[in-house]
Amino acid sequence: MSNWVLYIIIGQFIYAAVVLTDHFIVSKKIVSKPIVYSLYVSLLSVFAVVAIPFGVTLPLLSTILYVSAMSVSFILSIYFLYKSLEDSNPSEVVPVIGGVSAISAFLCAALLLDDELPGHFILGFTVLTAGMLLISHFKFSLRSFLLLSGSGIFFGLSAALIKLVFVSESFVNGFFWSRMANVVLALMLLLVPKIWKSVKEDWNKPKKPSKGLLVVGNKVMGAIGFLFVLVAIKGGNVAIVNALTALQYVFLLIFAIFFHRAMPEYFEEKVHKHEFLHKSLATGLIVIGFFILFI
């Protein structure tokens, strides 16, 4: 096995673990509300200051506009994700969001970057849609469906916008200013009275020593997963790396079985025997859909 394939597998394994921990944090109210958790995650982008010695320069005006739009899209995408994870299983939520995100990214790239849709887009779209409908088993409410769709659409839009940034900026500059835009927007949202009240209530809750460690540690793990993916992109085939993103959904299905049996008091993810084949088939369709779209 090529090293870069191993790196993408490790990266997606870490991403799956991070999502499962996100589910634990929001469903068990470790952080009081999804909007508060979204702000915490966005504020952690401040650690991108470590990139300054590597050649950060003042951004172009167009870059400021793009990263501003991207930060709005990013915060909305993770907010909708965390709202979905409050009440639903990660092995159902994340594949649907991932499928919508992949479709959204292609469409947004076509609109914003004048990229051509691949000739097999309709086939990939059809297979992905079939997998998403099957995994949801049509059991999501209209509210849940809108949250899932919104998260996926905004994740896809974020991907297209960061591509626009990298057209005119170096990787270091694009990375730094896109992270700083998240911090600035999060600070601006703290000026909204209702949001500020929610943050104050969360801080005034009885403190558990492990709370900050869990939140920060989970995001550090996410950053490590991102680095593994970047290394895979650098050393391997980008199309295959993108397609192998779907491995995250396979790992989530495995985690659903393991954590429900091993720690049911902490993780409410459930996969009953009669659902296993159903979810496996749906996940398989989504994986195939990714390969059709990206290869």
Image (cartoon, grey):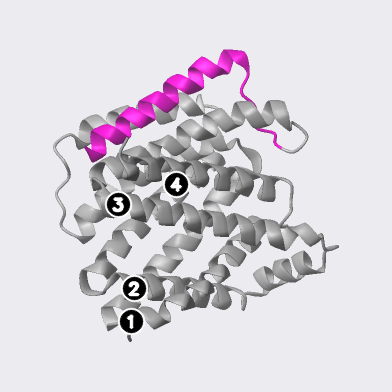
Disc 2, disc 4: CB below 8 Å? no
Identify the residue position indicated by label 2 in the image.
172
84 sits to left or right of 2: right
Q: Quadrant of residue 294?
A: top left
Pick the front one: 143 or 256: 256
Q: CA distance from mark 2 to mark 4?
A: 21 Å
Q: Residue 87: which disc?
A: none
| Quadrant (top left, top right, bottom left, bottom right) of the N terminus | top left
Secondary structure at numbered mark 3: helix
Q: Secondary structure at mark 1?
A: loop
Q: Which residue in the protein does label 3 denote?
A: 233
Q: Which residue is mark 1?
A: 55
Give the residues in magenta. 267-295
Q: Earlier in the sequence, mark 2 or mark 4?
A: 4
Q: Is residue 129 above or below residue 3?
A: above
Whole-percent x and y of residue 279? 50, 23
The reply, left or right, for residue 6 in relation to residue 123 is right
Please tell me which of labels 2 and 3 falls first in the chain.
Answer: 2
* Dot placed on the residue nearer the N-terminal end, 1 or 4: 4
Magenta stretch, main secondary structure class: helix
| Residues at marks 1 and 3, CA–CA distance in whole angstroms | 22 Å
Residue 33 vertical placement versus 126 (above, below): below
Q: Magenta span has 273?
A: yes
Q: Mark 4 = which residue?
A: 11
Residue placed at 34% from the left, 40% from the top?
Answer: 5
Q: Residue at x 25, y 37 (%)?
A: 293
Residue 148 location, x and y as percent?
A: 49, 43
Toward the top, the furthest residue is 274
Q: Position of residue 153 (x, y in %)?
A: 39, 50
| Marks 2 & 1, CB-CB < 8 Å contact | yes
Circle 3 residues within 10 Å: few <14, some 14–19, many ≥20: some
